[in-house]
Amino acid sequence: MMFPKLGKKKSPAKTLRKKCLKLWSEIVRGRANGLCEVCGKPAKDAHHIIARGTAPSMGWFDVDNGIALCFQCHRMHGAHSLDIDEQIAFREKMIVHLARKGIDYEILKIRCKAKGGIAHSDYGMLYLALLSDRQKITVRK
C-alpha cells in the first residue's frame, strides 16, 4: 500500500525558480559549447562565480555570473574544498576568464549583489527571458 507524501506542496514560485536555475545552467554550459572552461573536458555543471549565498536572487540568474565546469573541476574549485590561497588563485582565474569575455568582475559583483531580488510574480517573466537567451545560443551553434 502506498502512502501519500506528507508535507507542503512546493509553491509555484519555488518551482519556477528551480526551472529558471536549470535554464540558467543550460545557457552557461551552452555558451561554452558544453566544455569545461577550466580544463576542456565535457561540462556537467554551471558554477556561480559570485556565490548564490552572497547575492540576492537576481545574481542567481545573471548568465555572466556563470562558468561551465566538469564535475572534477567543480568539485575541486568548490569553496569548501580549497584553502584560502587556492580560493584567491581561483578567484583570480575567474577575473581573467570574465575579462576575456569583456565582463568586469567588480561591476558583475555590484550587479549581482544589488539590493532586492525577484518578486514571486516576476519568475514567469524571468523564465521567458532565459528561454529567449537559450534560443539565441542554440541558433548561434
Image (cartoon, rainbow, N blue to C red):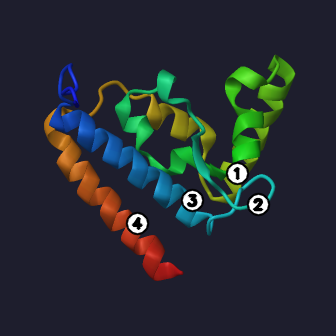
Q: Amino acid at mark 3?
A: Arg
Q: Residues within 10 Å of mark 4 (few under 14, many from 20)?
A: some
- Which is nearer the N-term, disc 1 or disc 2? 2
Q: Quadrant of residue 118?
A: top left
Taking depth in this image into account, of 6 and 81 the one nearest to the observer is: 6
The first of marks 1 and 4 along the sequence is 1
Q: Position of residue 99 (x, y in %)?
A: 68, 52
Q: Do the residues bearing badges 1 and 2 touch, measured as CB atoms within 8 Å?
A: yes
Estimate how packed mark 3 is, as few (under 14), some (14 to 19) or many (20 or more) residues with alpha carbons within 10 Å.
many
Disc nearer the start of the sequence (2/3): 3
Secondary structure at numbered mark 1: loop
Describe the element under mark 3 as helix, strand or loop.
helix
Which of label 3 and label 1 is nearer to you? 1
**Distance from the alpha carbon under mark 1 to that under mark 2:** 6 Å
Q: Residues within 10 Å of mark 1 (few under 14, many from 20)?
A: many
Label 2 belongs to which residue? 41
What residue sits right under mark 1 in the picture? 70
Q: CA distance from mark 4 to mark 3?
A: 10 Å
Name the residue tied to disc 3: 29
In primary-sequence order, the first of circles 4 and 3 is 3
On the rendered image, what quadrant is the C terminus found in?
bottom right
How far apart in space, not on screen, are marks 1 and 4 (Cα)? 20 Å
Residue 119 place in picture, x, y as percent: 19, 32
- CA gap between label 2 and label 3 equals 12 Å
The residue pinned by badge 4 equals 134
Callout 2 amino acid: Lys
Q: Residue at x 43, y 51 (%)?
A: 24
